[in-house]
Image (cartoon, helix red, strand yellow):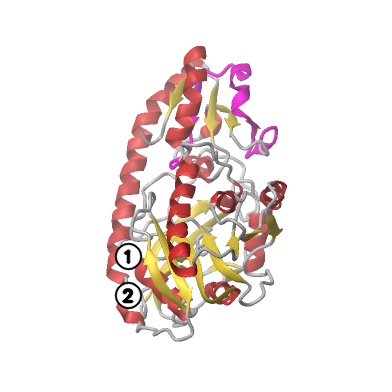
């Protein structure tokens, strides 16, 4: 079985000062789906997480009993709360445009279409209540056409939940694992890009299932671990403790008393999107019917190979540009104050040629990311830049399109990692 060894930190090679690493409380767990303590390592990699947790080595394992892929050991609950509370690079703090035609806008419309059809089919036209767990800025709740419905949200980010409330939404600042949700209080519960992050999967699923009324609907979306996308940043992020397949997600739902209604077969990214229904009389199947061990092994092996080829290609492509920028004394900015840039630092000593960071998140402008000052895109002209290196995967085209009018006018070279 091929696994991915940790990447060498190029700053350490260059003799940069190394501070004492943060102390992390590592916790060993049994399989979150079947509770068996028998698993094999399937994937491992070093992650540069920022000042709170520092550089850590993450190990994902494959349960030998049910085939579920999960992180073990993992940082404690308190460690992860510190990370999410203090890290500007955490995934939940990343800002993206919701302008019509943007990637996030298209994904929101996909989700809305999937939910509308099933809500009408199974719950009818009467006004009910919906809870969106991990609602971020409230885009999904705002775009659902549910006339008269009571809309509520739960969001751990203080700034995001505040913004959602300013839009007139009933959003509480809190996290799924600690929030008090009255049993049966919602007809629909949605939970998008949250389940992979939770520390206690069983307890979280139980809370989701109990929060919906009998016959009510649950909509979940998680990354599909059988379709990992090779990129500089890590698909199997250290923030993700559970790695789902269609089979293991079904198993997880049934364990919580939820029966599958439908999977969305038209998802525009490598995610699983599913609707399930609370039913006390459902049949729970044997776990081996959902065992995805062989499929996951093949997917992870291919992912490792593809990512290594991508990194080699990127190094080959950028080394000449970096040498040229350095020789000319070019003023270079990197676009993206997030996790992708941390991983890009594993391939290049960015400090040797990058002067500052650009990011579209207005809350980051004027602050610091690593040792660089963060500027908004509206400051590009004043910065006198010669080049911008875009550091994002999923939103690369969107960022590129937003930069090109300014770049063309001022003769700024714009470089992409993926296209």
Q: Position of residue 404 (x, y in %)?
A: 47, 22
Secondary element under disc 2, as helix, strand or loop, is loop
Residue 138 lies, with reference to residue 122, above or below; the image says above
| Residue identified by numbered label 1 | 296
Front: mark 2 or 1: 2
Q: Residue visible at 61% across and 76% down?
A: 184
* Foreground of the two, 366 or 4: 366
Task: Give the Cα separation between the discs numbered 2 and 1.
Answer: 10 Å
Secondary element under disc 1, as helix, strand or loop, is helix
From the viewer's perspective, tell me whether residue 34 is left or right of residue 144: left
From the viewer's perspective, tell me whether residue 277 is left or right of residue 187: left
Q: Position of residue 50 (x, y in %)?
A: 61, 49
Q: Quadrant of the N terminus?
A: bottom left
* Foreground of the two, 166 or 336: 166
Q: Residue visible at 35% across and 60% down?
A: 3
| Residue identified by numbered label 2 | 291
Q: Quadrant of the C terminus?
A: top left
* Foreground of the two, 24 or 30: 30
Image quadrant of residue 131? Answer: bottom right
Provide the residue span drawn in magenta: 365-394
Residue at the far front in the pictured view:
125
């Amino acid at each position: 079985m091929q696994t991915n060894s940790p990447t060498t930190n190029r700053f350490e090679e260059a003799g940069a000062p190394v501070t004492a690493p943060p102390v992390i409380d590592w916790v060993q767990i049994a399989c979150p789906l079947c509770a068996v303590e028998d698993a094999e390592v399937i994937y491992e990699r070093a992650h540069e997480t920022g000042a709170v947790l520092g550089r850590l080595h993450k190990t994902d394992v494959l349960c030998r009993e049910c085939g579920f892929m999960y992180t073990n050991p993992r940082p404690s609950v308190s460690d992860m709360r510190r990370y999410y509370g203090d890290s500007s690079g955490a995934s939940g703090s990343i800002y993206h445009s919701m302008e019509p035609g943007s990637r996030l806008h298209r994904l929101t419309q996909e989700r809305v279409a999937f939910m509308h059809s099933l809500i009408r089919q199974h719950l009818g036209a009467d006004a009910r209540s919906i809870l969106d767990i991990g609602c971020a800025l409230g885009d999904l709740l705002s775009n659902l056409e549910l006339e008269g419905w009571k809309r509520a949200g739960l969001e751990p980010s203080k700034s995001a939940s505040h913004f959602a409330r300013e839009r007139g939404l009933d959003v509480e600042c809190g996290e799924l694992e600690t929030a008090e949700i009255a049993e049966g209080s919602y007809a629909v519960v949605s939970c998008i890009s949250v389940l992979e992050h939770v520390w206690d999967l069983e307890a979280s699923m139980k809370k989701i299932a109990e929060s919906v009324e009998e016959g009510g609907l649950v909509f979940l979306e998680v990354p599909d671990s059988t379709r990992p996308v090779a990129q500089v940043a890590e698909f199997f992020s250290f923030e993700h403790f559970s790695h789902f397949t269609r089979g293991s997600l079904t198993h997880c739902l049934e364990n919580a008393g939820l029966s599958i209604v439908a999977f969305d077969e038209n998802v525009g990214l490598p995610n699983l999107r599913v609707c399930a229904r609370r039913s006390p009389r459902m049949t729970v199947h044997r776990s081996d019917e959902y065992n995805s061990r062989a499929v996951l092994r093949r997917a992870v092996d291919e992912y490792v190979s593809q990512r290594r080829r991508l990194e080699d290609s990127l190094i080959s492509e950028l080394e000449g540009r970096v040498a040229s920028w350095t020789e000319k004394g070019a003023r270079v900015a990197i676009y993206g104050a997030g996790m992708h840039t941390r991983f890009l630092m594993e391939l290049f000593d960015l400090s040797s040629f990058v002067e500052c960071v650009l990011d579209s998140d207005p809350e980051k402008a004027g602050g610091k990311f690593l040792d660089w000052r963060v500027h908004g895109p509206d400051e590009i002209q004043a910065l006198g830049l010669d080049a911008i290196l875009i550091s994002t995967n999923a939103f690369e085209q969107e960022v590129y399109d937003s930069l090109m009018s300014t770049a063309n006018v001022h003769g700024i070279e714009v470089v992409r990692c993926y296209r």
